[in-house]
Amino acid sequence: MLSYEILLAGFWFLFGCIFGSFANVVQLRGNWRAIATGNSECPSCGHQLRWYELIPILSFVFQGARCRSCKKAISWQYPLGELIMGLFFLLAWRDGMITGSWLAAGCTAFALFWWQIIAAEDSKTYTVEPLYCVFAAVLSLVRGLLLGTGFAAFQGLIFGMVMIIVVRVAWWLFRREEGMGDGDIWIAAAIGALVGWPQVLVALWFAVMLGAVWGVAVLMMKRRGGERLMLPFGPFLVAGGCGAVLFGDTLLTWYLGTLYL
Ligand SMILES: [Zn+2]
């Protein structure tokens, strides 16, 4: 029984890695319709990739991180994206194990698929395609409906949006500058919809903590004063969302426990 479960987890991880390749294609071509047209090629020389050059992570490793045709280095972001997506699908597998609904777990997996694309895009370009957030939010709401937690999912969506808007307005009032982009509102909505209420609080808490730690680390490494630090918040929101998926219930139970004592 246990070995069957591990086998199942392995399959979810594998599928995740494959979808990680698709996510790379979406980011590379900046267009989600690109998945449908297929045909991957080397961005440097245009060499059409054969099936054995498209095996997630392994192709990268065995080709020594180089294109087989032009020997140009392949970015480590490709295997990293595949690996992260594999781990995301493992999260979805865990979701299925907990809830017992594999249809809902499928929604989780594809919501996380868009999370990864959103995080990668925001960290590179400081912008987010709202449509990707809509995809993630809709999948999350469907998951909620399947599990009978649709209202909590909807509350999470609204709360995520409202919190970012509040922070944005407050920031503008105090600093007279834009602290967060419109994209963060969309991202927080998508993340809130998956983790739901009240776990969205945990997600935002994690995001702010991680963002602060990262920001301080970057400032210390730069050792230059007066320079305005530009950090995309999207990746931290996604990381915070993952933290909420993993530890949300535990942390909330613990925190509420300390209040009631
Ligand atoms: Zn090439």
Image (spheres, rainbow, N blue to C red):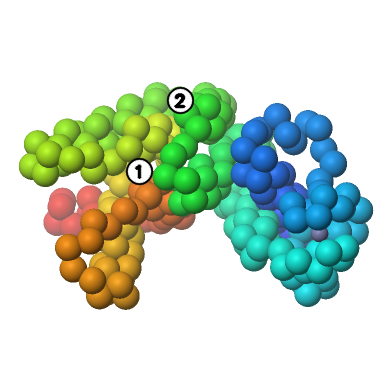
The foreground one among 250 and 167 is 167
In the rendered image, residue 181, in percent from the top left (x then y), is placed at: 33, 37
Q: Which mark is residue 150?
A: 2
Left or right of 43? Residue 231 is left
Which residue corresponds to mark 1? 199
- Say which label, 1 or 2, has the lower sequence index: 2
Q: Is residue 3 visible?
A: no
Q: Residue at x 70, y 29 (%)?
A: 33
In the rendered image, residue 71, in percent from the top left (x then y), is placed at: 81, 69
Left or right of 151? Residue 111 is right
Q: Is residue 39 above or below residue 228?
A: above
Q: Is residue 121 above or below residue 156?
A: below
The foreground one among 52 and 83 is 52
In the rendered image, residue 126, in percent from the top left (x then y), is placed at: 42, 45
Secondary element at tag 2: helix
Query: Badge 1, how many Cα within 10 Å: few under 14, some, many 20+?
Result: many
Q: Residue at x 72, y 68 (%)?
A: 73
